[in-house]
Image (cartoon, coloured by chain):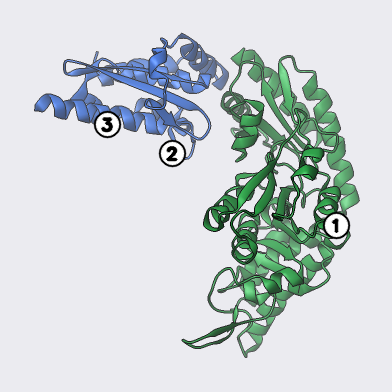
Chain colours: A green, B blue
């Protein structure tokens, strides 16, 4: 980039794609493509097998009890919208409450606001500390008989905070309240076991875990998915259709209307295999090293303020330079071939909480190195000098 | 000077910079020296919303000319604003409306005026031209 070797530190927005993912999708389109599920001919069967194999791989990856509970969606945003809409229409009534947190991405705020407007339910918000941790006592107090669902982020995209989701779920379940976790930022870093978590809904995007864009997963417990009405109508999701009445297909197809992103699913399956081949232990160890190394080096830069200093953190460093707008810092870094994200990261309420317009965010993935961080530190120092 | 004469002047100034650092240091300096906009105009009526940096623009008609004052919370954006103000302020409304701002491309800052950049500058240029049109129409009546 800009005639300099590029340093890509924006994997939290979208990760780069390994060869294996690109090749799997290429092979699918070259050799296997036909529409899935309905064809009587061999090629359609092969496409269906490739598509369903991806579902099977994801099932194993998150340890879901059944493939029926693994729904293909477009991404985390659609996963949350699906639950907000379908669960909300069925279970939310006037005066009911939905709990989210102050560190949610707009994708886990707006869908709930929309369904609250339609049903007359209220949104309650768990506050965060200055360090960027959820105030669990406040959450505990918030749970009551009117609470119908808790929807919180597993790992904050802006702060990197890894939330105590086990405890969040335990407290909600003690009052028979289901929990949805936004796993968009957790899935590239942490081993997710939906059974160990006992989580009711878990959703994430393929493109943040080395897979393609346009494909993601919503895991939902069968009992909820069966109780919920379909999200969209169309092909594949039906059993029989007449103008008087339509009966719906079984899970997971009930929630997969229309021709799905078959190639995307195949790519996601390849991404799962890629991550499993490297292994979560290796990924976490490497990323933790980068986080510790980066945090230490960045902290030494005069005038820097790191936003989000939770004890449990994923490999994200959000920061501000004294007196400099994040946009200016990002622009200077870009000139040096360093790709970071600047702005409010779709978490405007969180920016308001800290009274800042946005941050500069560097996020690290398994393919980043300490040299990348050295370049970042050098770039930030340069930016500080130019903007100071 | 006409709009195009000023554009040529800026292109000439920028041709002396050896690397991106010199260029950006100059833009930052321009940002720092941009005359302050009246605080009363830094309100919701004058804001141009970019996703990342905020821009305020005020247009003051003076006969058939318009005087622009503007500000931003980001210094690089502010420096670019200083250039746009230098080119378009105190020019005839009709000429502002018609202006072809080719200097941006020539000095290698086109990316900052890309619609996807979300810094408010594209909307600012659009707004300046709209003022040009509006005041031209008003004066014609």
Q: Element type at marker 1?
A: helix
Query: Dividing the image into 4 quarters, which one contains the N terminus of chain A?
Result: top right
Say few, some or many: other residues with alpha carbon within 10 Å of mark 1 (under 14 / 14 to 19 / 20 or more): some
- B51 and B87: which one is in front? B51
B37 to the left or right of A144: left
- Residue A94 got which mark? none
Whole-percent x, y for residue A166 in the image:
86, 51
- Name the residue carrying label 1: A197
**Image: A144 above or below A331:** below
Whole-percent x, y for residue A59 in the image:
80, 68
Q: Element type at marker 3?
A: helix
Which label's residue is closer to the chain start, 2 or 3?
Answer: 2
Chain ID at mark 2: B
- Name the residue carrying label 2: B115
Which residue lies at the image location 54% right of the left edge and 15% below the top edge?
A: B25
Whole-percent x, y for residue A214 in the image:
60, 59
- Name the residue carrying label 3: B130
Q: Element type at marker 2?
A: loop
A121 to the left or right of B113: right
Q: CA distance from mark 3 to mark 1?
A: 56 Å
Mark 1 vs 2: CB contact within 8 A: no
Say few, some or many: other residues with alpha carbon within 10 Å of mark 2 (under 14 / 14 to 19 / 20 or more): few
Query: Dividing the image into 4 quarters, which one contains the C terminus of chain A?
Result: top right
**Image: A175 above or below B92:** below
Q: CA distance from mark 1 to mark 2?
A: 43 Å
Chain ID at mark 3: B
């Amino acid at each position: 980039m800009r005639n300099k070797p590029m340093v890509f530190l924006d994997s939290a927005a979208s990760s780069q794609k390994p060869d294996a993912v690109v090749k799997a999708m290429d092979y699918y389109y070259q050799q296997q493509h036909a529409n899935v599920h309905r064809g009587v001919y061999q090629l359609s069967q092969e496409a269906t097998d490739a598509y369903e194999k991806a579902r099977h791989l994801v099932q194993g990856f998150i340890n879901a009890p059944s493939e029926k509970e693994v729904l293909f969606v477009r991404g985390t945003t659609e996963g949350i919208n699906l639950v907000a809409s379908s669960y909300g229409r069925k279970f939310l009534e006037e005066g009911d409450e939905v709990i989210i947190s102050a560190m949610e991405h707009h994708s886990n705020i707006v869908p709930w606001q929309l369904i609250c407007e339609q049903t007359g339910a209220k949104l309650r918000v768990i506050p965060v500390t200055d360090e960027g941790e959820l105030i669990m006592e406040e959450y505990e107090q918030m749970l009551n008989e009117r609470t119908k669902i808790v929807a919180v982020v597993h790992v904050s995209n802006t702060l990197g905070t890894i939330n105590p989701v086990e405890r969040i779920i335990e407290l909600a379940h003690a009052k028979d309240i289901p929990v949805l976790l936004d796993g968009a930022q957790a899935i590239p870093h942490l081993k997710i076991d939906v059974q160990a978590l006992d989580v009711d809904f878990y959703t994430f995007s393929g493109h943040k875990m080395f897979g393609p864009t346009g494909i993601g997963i919503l895991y939902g417990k069968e009992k909820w998915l069966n109780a919920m009405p379909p999200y969209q109508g169309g092909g594949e999701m039906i059993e029989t259709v007449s103008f008087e009445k339509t009966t719906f297909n079984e899970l997971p197809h009930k929630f997969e209307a229309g021709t799905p992103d078959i190639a995307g699913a195949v790519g996601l399956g390849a991404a799962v295999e890629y991550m499993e081949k490297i292994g979560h232990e290796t990924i976490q160890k490497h990323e933790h090293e980068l986080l510790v190394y980066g945090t230490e080096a960045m902290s030494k830069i005069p005038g820097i303020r790191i936003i989000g200093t939770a004890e449990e953190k994923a490999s994200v460093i959000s920061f501000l330079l004294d007196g400099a707008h994040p946009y200016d810092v990002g622009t200077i870094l870009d000139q040096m071939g360093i790709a970071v994200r600047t702005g409010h990261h779709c978490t405007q309420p969180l920016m308001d909480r800290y009274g800042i317009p946005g941050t500069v965010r560097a996020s690290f993935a398994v393919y980043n190195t300490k040299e990348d961080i050295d370049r970042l530190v050098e770039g930030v120092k340069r930016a500080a000098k130019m903007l100071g | 000077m006409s709009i195009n004469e000023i554009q040529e002047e800026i292109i000439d100034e920028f041709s002396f910079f050896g690397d991106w650092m010199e260029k950006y240091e100059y833009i930052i300096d321009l940002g720092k020296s941009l005359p302050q906009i009246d605080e009363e105009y830094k309100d919701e009526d004058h804001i141009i919303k970019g996703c990342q940096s905020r821009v305020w623009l005020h247009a003051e008609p003076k006969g058939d000319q318009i005087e622009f004052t503007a500000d931003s919370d980001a210094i690089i954006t502010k420096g670019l604003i200083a250039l746009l103000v230098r080119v378009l302020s105190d020019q005839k409304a009709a000429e502002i409306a018609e202006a072809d701002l080719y200097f941006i491309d020539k000095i290698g800052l086109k990316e900052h005026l890309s619609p996807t950049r979300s810094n408010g500058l594209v909307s600012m240029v659009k707004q300046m031209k709209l003022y040009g049109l509006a005041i031209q129409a008003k004066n014609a009546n």
